[in-house]
Image (spheres, helix red, strand yellow):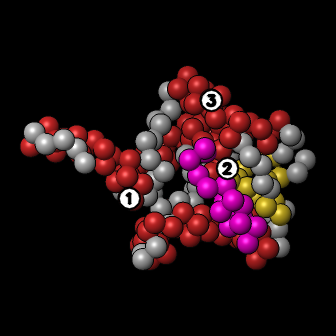
Amino acid sequence: MARVLVHLCCGPCAIVPVSALKAQGFEVTGYFSNPNIHPLTEYLRRRETLLQAARLLDIPVLFPDAEYQPRVFFQAVTGREEERCPPCYALRLEPTARAAREMGFTAFTTSLLYSKYQKHEAIRQAGLAAAQAQGLDFLYQDFREGWKEGVTRSKEWGLYRQQYCGCLYSEAERYARELARAVAAETGLAPS
């Protein structure tokens, strides 16, 4: 059975990729490397939710918590906040590829490929670059067609479903409308 190391960003996003890979005959191990998640309490909540999902999916997950260094994320994206996703993908896929090589996997992939909100071509490019650097295969699969199934199962399983990708910038973007409405309600001015 072929072994694949799967970068996992959270529990809900793990469901469809892990299930699909197992159905294809892969032996799946998860890898939770996400220095982009902010704040630490969010990281811990997603970590715990991934443990729940991993038990239900019956897979082992590695938690290289020493890699959780938000400062590294901020250094990588400072000055390119509007185009922050490609360096963020690289920050997560490069350690995953390195770990895959060190542990004897011949391929790796990521649950980022499940999200309809992520930039798939940028993920693919980051995965291919990390794979080439480590002498591995990046297993690109578009898992987005299982989006609704993953949402349904995560709700049935009672998993915490985060409302932003993880970084401080996406959190601010996600909640900007709510802030504008609150300000409008307080001031009596229409939100801009």
* Residue annotated with mark 3: 148
Residue 160 seen from this side: yes
Q: Is label 3 in a helix, a strand or a loop?
A: helix
- Where is residue 118 drawn, in percent x and y? 59, 52
Query: Looking at this view, is 86 or 96 the one in front?
Result: 86
Q: Is label 2 in a helix, a strand or a loop?
A: helix
Classify residue 20 as left or right of residue 152: right
- Where is 105 relative to 78, above or below? above
What residue is rendered at 61% in x and 45% in y?
A: 115
Is there a contact, CB below 8 Å, between mark 3 and mark 1?
no
- Where is 34 relative to 91, above or below? above
- Where is 85 relative to 132, above or below? above
What residue is rendered at 67% in x and 55% in y?
A: 120
Q: Residue furthest left?
A: 187
Q: Earlier in the sequence, mark 2 or mark 1?
A: 2
Classify residue 106 as left or right of residue 71: right
Q: Earlier in the sequence, mark 3 or mark 2?
A: 2
Amino acid on which disc 2 is placed: Leu
Q: CA distance from mark 3 to mark 1?
A: 26 Å
- Where is residue 35 drawn, in percent x and y? 49, 64
Amino acid on which disc 1 is placed: Leu
What residue is rendered at 90% in x and 47% in y?
A: 1
Q: Earlier in the sequence, mark 3 or mark 1?
A: 3
Of the numbered discs in the image, which one, if any, rests on residue 113?
2
Badge 2 density bin: few <14, some 14–19, many ≥20, Cα 10 Å: many
Badge 1 density bin: few <14, some 14–19, many ≥20, Cα 10 Å: some
Q: Is label 1 in a helix, a strand or a loop?
A: helix
* Residue annotated with mark 1: 168
Amino acid on which disc 3 is placed: Lys
In the figure, residue 101 lies in which quadrant? Answer: bottom right
Q: Which residues are magenta?
A: 115-129
